[in-house]
Image (cartoon, rainbow, N blue to C red):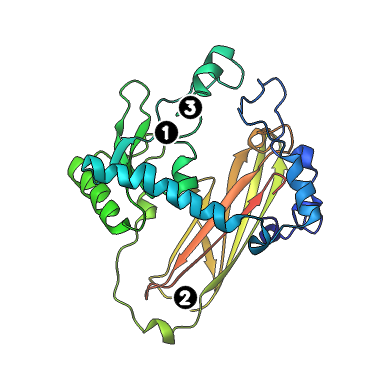
Amino acid sequence: FLRANADPAIPDLASVDGAKIFPQPPGTLPDRYEDSFDLTEYVGRAKRGVTPFEAIPELDAGLKGLEATRRIDFEDWLDAQGLDAVVFPAVADVGPADADVNEASAALAWRNGTWVANGNLVPRHLGIPTVTVPMGTMADIGMPVGLTFAGKAYEDTKLLRLAGDFERFGQRRTSPPRTPELPDDVFAARPAARQPDEAPPLTVTLAAEARRAGDQDEITVTLDVHGEIGTETSVKVHVNGQPIRMQRTGARFTGRAVVPAKEHERIHSVWRGSYGSIISAVVRLEDGRAAGAYVVTGGIG
C-alpha cells in the first residue's frame, strides 16, 4: 500500500511513525481488544526485516496442525451430522453509532459477533471457506444483513452453488436508500466499430482548479481526450457526484462548477485537512472503448 502511494517521505512501513497508526481520536473511549497488541511494534518488525516463510520455525508442523484441526473439528463433524454446510447470520448485532463515546453503547458494540463477524478468526485461521449473501434488511434501522455459508475446504463450487441458490430464491438484496441509482451509471450496449486489438488506446487528462469568490469556490475543469472523438462520443464529468455541462473545443472540454466554500473547509479528521471536491470524468467512444480519471481540488488533495 505504501509502495503504491509512492510517497518519498513514507516509502515503506519502516519509515512510519508507529504511534500514528490508528491513533485514538480525542474524546473517544479506548478500544477493547482482548488480545492487547501494539501496532507500533509492526514498525520495529519492518525495520528488523520480515522473516521469509520458509525460515519461520515450525511453520510446516503448524500449518499441518491447522489443517488437521479443520478436518477433525469441522469436516468430520459435518460428515457425522450428515450436513453439507453450516449456515448462520454473518453478524450477531449492529453496534450503536455512538459506541466510540458512550460506555453502554460500547459494551454492545464490542461483543463477539458484533465488532467482528460471527465465527471471528476461526474460519480464516483454519481455512474454512465461506460465502456471504444478502439475508434481508432490519425493519427498525434499515441495515442490510448477510447470511454466511461455511463448507468443506476445496469444495468451493458446491458452496457457491448453495449460497447462489439461496440468493436467487430469496431475492433479499435491497438497494441502498441513501445512494439511489444514477442513470449515468448505465451504458447502452453498442456494436463495436472495430476489433479491440486494432483500436488505439484511449486516454484522458483531467485537471481542476478552485478559486475563492466570497463564500463560494468556483471550480474550473479541463478535460483533454487523447484519441478519436466522434459525434456519438459520451463525455460525463461530475463534481462531487453532480454532473456539470462541458463545452468542447477540438479534443478539449471545459466546464465550471460552484461549491460552497465551507465544503472545502470542513474537517473530517483531527489529523488531516479538509478533503476538497472530487472531480471525475468518463469518456466512452462509439466502439465501446472508455477511459476515466479523477482529481481533487479545493482541499489537501
> Measured along the vertical axis of the image, is residue 198 above or below residue 107?
below
Q: Is residue 174 visible?
A: no
Query: Which residue ends up furthest to the bottom in the rendered image?
Result: 198
Decide if residue 102 is on the left or right side of residue 174.
right
Disc marking residue 112: 3
Spatial CA distance of label 2 from label 1 is 52 Å
The residue under the point 24% across, 49% down is 162
The residue carrying mark 1 is 118
Secondary element at image label 2 = loop
> In the picture, residue 91 is in which quadrant?
top left
Q: Which of marks 3 and 2 is nearer the N terminus?
A: 3
Image position, residue 156 (x, y; %): 32, 56
Tag 2: Cα neighbours inside 10 Å, few (<14), some, or many (≥20)?
Answer: some
| Up/down of 103 relative to 249, above or below | above
- Could you say where residue 37 lies in the image, as x and y percent from the top left? 68, 35
For residue 256, side relative to residue 37 (left or right): left
Tell me the residue that label 2 is attached to.
Answer: 229
Tell me which residue sits at (48%, 61%) in the image. 282
**Front-lying residue, 26 or 189:** 26
Lower sequence index among marks 2 and 1: 1
Label 3 SS:
loop
Vertical order, 289 against 113 (above or below): below
